Amino acid sequence: MNCKLCSALFQEFLEDSLSEELIVEVQDHIRTCSKCRVSLRTYTLTVTLSRKVDPPCCVSPETLDRLKKIIRERLLKTNGVPV
Ligand SMILES: [Zn+2]
């Protein structure tokens, strides 16, 4: 497992669509590679954020932007990772 392959598998890893074998490979790599650990966390946050902010039709784009900014700042404080 290398970094390039590892990051290519993030999406499937999060969707749980990898084989048992590959899940172990990704987990092993993430345990030893801080770069990929941060990337995966950032990737997870991005996916979570984009899912959360999709539907609200009653919120103006300005409000949504402000909310996204607040969420990002909270996450940054909590995790110390820029989103
Ligand atoms: Zn790596």
Image: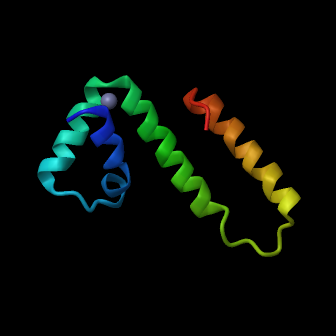
User: Which residue is farthest front?
Assistant: 4
Left or right placement of residue 50 versus residue 61 in this view? left
Q: Position of residue 73 (x, y in %)?
A: 71, 36
Which residue is at 51% across, 40% downward? 42
Q: How many marks?
A: 0
Ligand 1's quadrant is top left
- What quarter of the picture does the N terminus occupy? top left
Question: Looking at the image, which is closer to me, 50 or 74?
Answer: 50
Q: Is residue 14 above or below residue 79?
A: below
Residue 41 locus on image (x, y percent): 46, 39
In the displayed structure image, the side of residue 53 where residue 58 appears, left or right: right
Quadrant in which the C terminus appears: top right
State the image quarter where residue 32 is shown.
top left
Residue at 59% from the left image edge and 32% from the top image edge: 78
Residue sitting farthest toward the left: 21
Q: Quadrant of residue 14?
A: bottom left
Q: Position of residue 37 (x, y in %)?
A: 38, 32
Residue drawn 69% across the image and 45% down it: 71
Q: Residue at x 38, y 54 (%)?
A: 11
Q: Of 33 and 59, which appears nearest the observer? A: 33
